[in-house]
Amino acid sequence: MTVRLLLISPPAGRALREARFDDGTPLAPADLTRAREAAPELPPYERLLTAPSARCRQTAGVFGRDAVEVPELAGLDAGRWRGRPLAEVSAAEPDAVAAWLSDPAAAPHGGESVRELCARVTGWLESAGGGRTLAVVEPEIVRALVLTALNAPGSAFWRIDVPPLTATELTGRAGRWNVRVGRAL
């Protein structure tokens, strides 16, 4: 059965604007307003899924129906870097940040590597049901699913930009995917 999966990245939120690792900070009222303004641009869907982060759950809530939270769609576990500004971590641990950004198997923060994240979401995608599904997920989940769909190497992970409130569509089935990226809502 063909899968139509529309991945929506949530509004930027405070952590992204401050260039720090997400720590679960909820969206500001202005971010929620942007999500409400984008909602009419969404195509019809049969299921609404959400990553467990606060900003994904809040964004999905704005879209009007009860969303099903999917643990496998959680954002990258940044371990001990969680909540810290990237500039601070880069100054304190330049070699660790360089390794994290260049080696998909590296997890110097004690959390999850890009390779582990990609394996997690690939497993989820292979078991995703058919029909039209809208999933509100963090940008790194969009990156990982695009890599999976294109059978691209993990080294391409940081080369994919996922702006806030954009849609990336995957259509197909396990082993054969088409990708449409970055449509603004």
Image: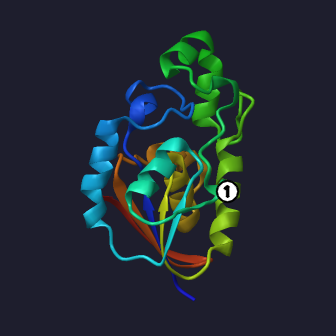
Residue 129: x, y in percent? 61, 79
Please report the residue visible at 72 percent of the width from the left and 34 percent of the height from the top. Answer: 111
Please report the residue visible at 66 percent of the width from the left and 72 percent of the height from the top. Answer: 126
Which quadrant of the structure image shows residue 125? Answer: bottom right
Residue 15 visible: yes
Residue farthest to the bottom? 1
Quarter of the figure that contains the N terminus: bottom right
Residue 155: x, y in percent? 58, 46
In the depicted structure, whether residue 110 falls above or below residue 131: above
Residue 185 visible: no
| Image position of 161 (left or right of 97) | left
Front-lying residue, 161 or 127: 127
Front-lying residue, 5 or 14: 14
Residue 43: x, y in percent? 33, 73
Residue farthest to the right? 110
Quarter of the figure that contains the C terminus: bottom left
Residue 175: x, y in percent? 61, 77
Secondary structure beneath dot 1 equals helix
| Image position of 117 (left or right of 19) | right
Which quadrant of the structure image shows residue 13? Answer: top left
> What colouring method underlies this structural image?
rainbow
Please report the residue visible at 54 percent of the width from the left and 29 percent of the height from the top. Answer: 21
Please report the residue visible at 67 percent of the width from the left and 55 percent of the height from the top. Answer: 71
Question: Which amino acid, by three-letter code, is at mark 1?
Answer: Glu
| Image position of 161 (left or right of 39) | right
Which quadrant of the structure image shows residue 100? Answer: top right
Residue farthest to the top? 92
Count of numbered tags: 1
Front-lying residue, 62 or 147: 62
In the depicted structure, whether residue 68 falls above or below residue 78: below
Mark 1 neighbour class, 10 Å CA radius: few under 14, some 14 to 19, many 20 or more: some
- Reading the image, the residue beneath label 1 is 72
